[in-house]
Image (cartoon, helix red, strand yellow):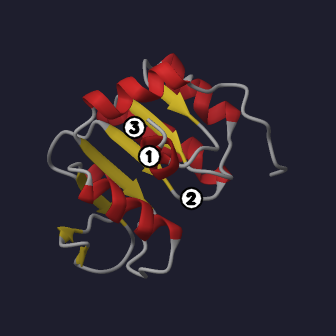
Amino acid sequence: MECEFPTINSNKDEIKEIFETVKTIAVLGLSPDPDKDSHRVAAYLQNCGYKIVPVYPKGETILGETVYKSLEEIPFAVDMVNIFRKPDALDAVADACIKRGDIKVFWAQAGIVNNEAAQKAKDAGMIVVQNQCAMVDHRNM
């Protein structure tokens, strides 16, 4: 897939509202490696008081939280997905979010854009953020 420009994105007011209302964040692609961006962002959000739910194919715990291999395996409500996956994986992520029915925010991290998946998520009622870092946006609030 070629790099896309995000045609669907939230504004600063919506992003502020996200951080004021969200409590539980599933981090898709949360690496156990503390040098990886996904780990640093998740640790920052966790330190700010958000419940972090690692979604990663291996391991039992990351940042002291139980690791789930997929969104479908998480047995409790999730407010937001923070996605550290390649853009072509976002269609399946959007489908999984829609199937769950409890996800309010579909957030693709900096460098990640998939307008088709974003439109799917938006059409299902989710707030969509693409190509933005949740840690940077939170700090800038």
Mark 3 lies on a secondary structure that is helix
Residue 41 position, x and y percent, is 43, 60
Residue 85: image tag = 2
Residue 3: image tag = none
Q: Residue at x 20, y 50 (%)?
A: 49
Q: Residue at x 35, y 60 (%)?
A: 44
Front position in the image: 101 or 29: 29
Q: Nearer the viewer, mark 1 or mark 3?
A: 1
Residue 20 position, x and y percent, is 29, 29
Circle 3: residue type = Cys
Tag 1 or tag 2, which sits nearer the N-term? Answer: 2
Give the residue pinned by disc 3: 97
Calculate the distance from the C-alpha at mark 3 to the C-alpha at mark 2: 14 Å
Calculate the distance from the C-alpha at mark 1 to the C-alpha at mark 3: 26 Å
Give the residue pinned by disc 1: 139
Residue 51 position, x and y percent, is 20, 51
In the depicted structure, whether residue 72 falls above or below residue 33:
above
Tag 2 or tag 3, which sits nearer the N-term? Answer: 2
